[in-house]
Amino acid sequence: MSFNATPFAERRARLIASMQQAGGGVAIIPTAPEVMRNRDADYPYRHDSYFYYLSGFTEPEAVLVLIAGRESRSILFCRDKNLEREIWDGYRFGPQAAQQQFAFDAAHPIDELDKSMPALLADAPAVYYALGHDDKRDAQLQRWMQGVRALSRSGVAAPGSVVDVSVLVDEMRLFKDAFEIDLMKRAGVISAEAHCRAMRLSRPGLREYHLEAELLHEFRRNGSQYPAYGSIVATGANSCVLHYRAADAELKDGDLVLIDAGCELDGYAADITRTFPANGRFTGPQRELYDIVLAAQAAAVAETAPGKRFMDGHDAAVRVLAQGMLDTGLLDKRKVGSLEDVIEKGDYRQFYMHRTGHWLGMDVHDVGDYRDPPAADGSKPWRTLQPGMVLTVEPGIYVRPGEGVPEKYWNIGIRIEDDAHVTPTGCELLTTGVPSKADDIEALMRQA
Ligand code: GLY
Ligand code: MN
Ligand code: MN
């Protein structure tokens, strides 16, 4: 598929328009640095999400400069063509081809950045830049500002303020356009297929890394560049460790496997969790807790709609989970009291200690404010959901062994996570390609 520069150019135009509304200025958005892993070997390169959002350009050593003045301009600084380096490392666009293919107004070699920036910043009312993320970049900006001030005798002024550009771009990124939703749907389809593959191939005696390999196989063969985050493949007691990473534990007959994994496709993440029995059949106690988590997820999905608040889904999930904890005896009614008491005092946190969701986009924990602007009384209500937002819905129950905790539930960790796109009428789940009902999971695993 040929590269479509239009969505990226439109985003640049929108950012420039909001800068112009605020009086104009110059935005500086660098991409991520390459990072050395160990002697001569670097980590797989991943561009910066802000930079990519506004450029579509994935090479390292690049900086985007947007000018919002009487005239507006987008300028890319990128690596120059270099036959010697291209023989070793592969193709580089170089400024000329990058300018054409990515629809910038101009492009220059990155080596010219230091020389060009003081002149570009001269007389700009403000610099739009995300300070405090990279010391080297911050120092570079300081040098450029000193460069402009050195020109003051020739009648130019240095920018009077530095504005955090990420505040403007975060708000744009929170609302996904049609191009982004399409990509996120494809990332969801590939990731769901990877979960199905892992379920089908699961059997006692395998190790966690075997299932991780199956996930990677499905991601890569469908064109995903890499996992969107370190895959969690956790069996037995490991399923109760929230940030566990796939390791070498053996899948035991009668144990559950919790997989939290999603691919990144052309810069966009999917984030799916499924929990299934290693041998294809839930035990009675596993199934009891599983159905509570599934019901909690359904309750949270029902609260994921325009006009609802970000935490409504969490509150709905907590209600179902807490009731389930009382019904199963995970929480002892005589000790903790009624459902309302459990919710108010937070006793459910012994078994459910995380939030039910987060924004999802280019970053798995994506940017965007979780609160609406302050109300008249100074309170900051949770964000009102609106069409175009994408968030995860991921309740769970994690039972560590403990005094008073019924033994039949010990070491059961369950999470069910799907990705929801808020639509004008409710929400659309992007990750339904992998079953989540216990019967459907067992049916899929019987096909193996
Ligand atoms: N996979 C990270 C999360 O679910 O938040
Ligand atoms: Mn998540
Ligand atoms: Mn997840």
Image (cartoon, helix red, strand yellow):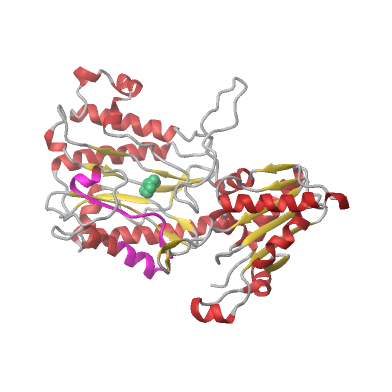
Query: Residue 219, position in %: x, y?
Result: 37, 64
Residue 225 is inside the magenta segment: yes
The image position of residue 69, as x and y in percent, is: 79, 52
The structure residue drawn at horizontal position 62% and vertical position 22%, both measured from the top left corner, is 376
Q: Count the marks: how many?
A: 0
Q: Position of residue 140 (x, y in %)?
A: 64, 54
Q: Which residues are magenta?
A: 215-239
Image quarter of residue 322: top left
Q: Is residue 84 visible?
A: yes
- Residue 72 vertical position relative to residue 321 in the rendered view, above or below: below
Q: Is residue 329 left or right of residue 108?
A: left
Q: Is residue 7 visible?
A: no
Could you tell me which quadrant the C terminus lies in?
A: bottom left
Please provide percent x and percent y for residue 107.
Answer: 70, 67
Residue pictured at 19% horizontal, 23% vertical: 332
176 to 339, vertically: above or below = below
Of residues 72 and 188, which is closer to you in this image?
A: 72
Can residue 390 be found in the magenta stretch? no
Horizontally, residue 154 falls left or right of residue 60, namely right
Res 287 → quadrant: top left
- Which residue is located at x 45 percent, y 33 percent? 311
| Above or below for 66 versus 19 | below
* Towards the viewer: 323 or 35: 35
Up/down of 303 relative to 133, above or below? above
